Image (tube, rainbow, N blue to C red):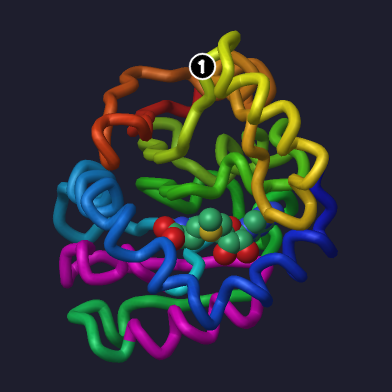
Amino acid sequence: MITLAETRQAYRGYAPAYDLLFGPLLQSARRRAIRLANDRPGQRVLEIGVGTGLSLPHYRPDARLDGIDVSGEMLAKARARAAHTPLAGRCHFQLMNAEAMGFEDASFDVVVALFVASTVQDLARFGAEIRRVCRPDGRIVLVNHFSMPGGLSARFGHYLGRYAGSLGFEPYFPLPRFIAETGLTITAIRPTGIFGRLKLVEATRD
Ligand SMILES: C[S@@+](CC[C@H](N)C(=O)[O-])C[C@H]1O[C@@H](n2cnc3c(N)ncnc32)[C@H](O)[C@@H]1O
């Protein structure tokens, strides 16, 4: 399990080069996820682990966005980027842990988490908090890599797992574990991004 201190340290290190390393590579998946999630006028959206805000240009200009992250360095970049998007003035960023959020129950029409599930410290608390802050009829949209069980890549992922704290993510992250621990009700899973190797996951609260 990755600790909060390890996550913060890892993303403090990634922040200066994050957009270069993970920007264009993952951008088509971000665009697809945000278009799917933010498909109606005036939605109140929560983006968990908003990072440097690479998803921001893809939101509708009438969305009301709350972006949270545990890394102050990543969040500072999101704030700077937001000023240059149509969402400027309609988004609010907070240093906040997704596993203990300060929002009231059922606050959001949509909850989004892009490449975050494999970086959090406790998947069960992450899932419980997402379900709590999402409206009963709301939607949950995530993108992540999910490991295939067995084979060479699984063995390599297991091996890299000992470095998860320094990497800031779990290299071996199978879908069944994600579903079991988050308790989310999955309604659709589609391949996306990098030759379909990522998964775009839609879920509901109950
Ligand atoms: C791989 S980055 C993804 C950033 C962004 N979503 C993107 O599309 O590039 C994971 C982000 O999740 C944040 N994070 C990890 N654990 C978190 C937690 N418990 N609560 C909030 N943010 C968290 C990290 O600080 C980091 O900015």
Q: Residue at x 65, y 28 (%)?
A: 156
Is residue 31 one of those drawn in magenta? Answer: no
Residue 204 quadrant: top left
- Is there any visible trace of residue 103 in the rendered image? no
User: Which residues are the magenta region?
Assistant: 53-82
Query: In this view of the protein, which residue sits in the foreground, 95 or 10?
Result: 10
Image location of residue 100, percent across then percent down? 74, 53
Residue at mark 1: 148
**Whole-percent x, y for residue 159 in the image:** 75, 31
Query: In this view, which residue lies farthest toward the front?
Result: 152
The front one of 187 and 117 is 117
Percent coordinates x, y for residue 176 in the rendering: 58, 14
Side of 164 relative to 28 (left or right): right
Q: Quadrant of ligand 1?
A: bottom right
- Can residue 152 be seen at all in this image of the molecule? yes
At x 22% / y 63%, what residue is drawn? 59
Q: In the image, 7: left or right of 81?
A: right
Q: Residue at x 27, y 57 (%)?
A: 27
Label 1 SS: loop
Are there few (<14), some (14-19), or many (20+) residues within 10 Å of tag 1? some
- Magenta stretch holds residue 68: yes
